[in-house]
């Protein structure tokens, strides 16, 4: 039985980001909530939330959560769209994930979830809504953790990729992913 909902966990990440004056996008939020699920299954052997994590072209996504924040597009989320998580156990998971990956950019989190973890085994460009099994997410926690720490400790310049979850059409493992910028950025620099 799940401890919480993806929406409450996401709202808590948005709240932390706003309090620390760190911008957070829908793409970042998706990856942080997915990492929370991974950690919960790894450490507690129980998912943090019941909604399925799906393999979309921009990586792991929780579809109902994407719907809550898609109105922000590729811009910074301004406020939580649901009540915050209040359980102490899930709050500890959120804090641990934030400590490990909260400072990573959207591009870094995109690369993280594309280079390690079960997303690659489940993504199919011709099939929508493929669920990633929670046990596989839990099994990937140590790899996620190691890669997140590697990225955090060896920062490279990167920009936001794509616009939202559905518009980046590049190769899922492309090293060029960090070169993609939102359309609004490209238009300003042209």
Image (cartoon, rainbow, N blue to C red):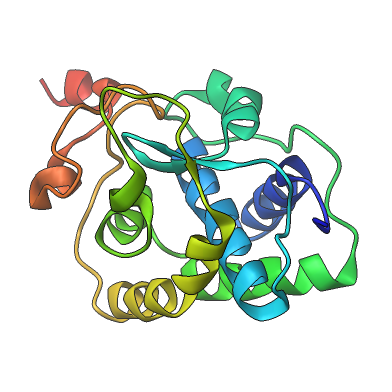
| Residue 107 visible from this viewpoint | no
Q: Is residue 179 left or right of residue 22?
A: left
- Frontmost residue, 34 versus 140: 140
- Frontmost residue, 81 versus 50: 50
Residue 111 sits in quarter: bottom left
Q: Is residue 37 left or right of residue 31?
A: right
What is the x, y in percent for residue 26?
A: 51, 37
Q: Which quadrant of the rendered structure holds the N terminus?
A: bottom right
Q: Is residue 55 left or right of residue 137?
A: left
Number of dots carrying numbers: 0
What is the x, y in percent for residue 134?
A: 58, 57
Residue 142 sits in quarter: bottom left
Q: Residue at x 24, y 78 (%)?
A: 154
| Residue 70 visible from this viewpoint | yes
Q: Residue at x 41, y 27 (%)?
A: 164
What is the x, y in percent for residue 79?
A: 70, 36
Q: Residue at x 57, y 30 (%)?
A: 63
What is the x, y in percent for residue 64?
A: 65, 29
């Amino acid at each position: 039985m799940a401890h919480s909902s993806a929406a409450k966990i996401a709202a808590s990440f948005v709240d932390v980001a706003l309090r620390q004056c760190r911008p957070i996008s829908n793409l970042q939020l998706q990856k942080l909530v997915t990492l929370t699920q991974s950690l919960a299954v790894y450490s507690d052997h129980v998912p943090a939330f019941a909604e399925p994590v799906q393999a979309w072209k921009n990586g792991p996504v929780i579809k109902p959560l994407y719907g809550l924040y898609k109105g922000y597009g590729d811009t910074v989320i301004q406020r939580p769209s649901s009540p915050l998580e209040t359980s102490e156990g899930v709050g500890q998971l959120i804090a641990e994930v934030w400590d490990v990956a909260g400072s990573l950019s959207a591009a870094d989190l995109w690369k993280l979830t594309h280079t390690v973890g079960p997303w690659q085994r489940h993504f199919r460009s011709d099939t929508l809504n493929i669920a990633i099994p929670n046990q596989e997410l839990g099994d990937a926690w140590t790899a996620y953790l190691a890669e997140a720490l590697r990225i955090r400790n060896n920062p490279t310049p990167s920009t936001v990729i794509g616009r939202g979850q559905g518009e980046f059409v590049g190769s899922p493992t492309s090293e060029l992913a960090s070169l993609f910028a939102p359309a609004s950025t490209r238009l300003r620099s042209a």
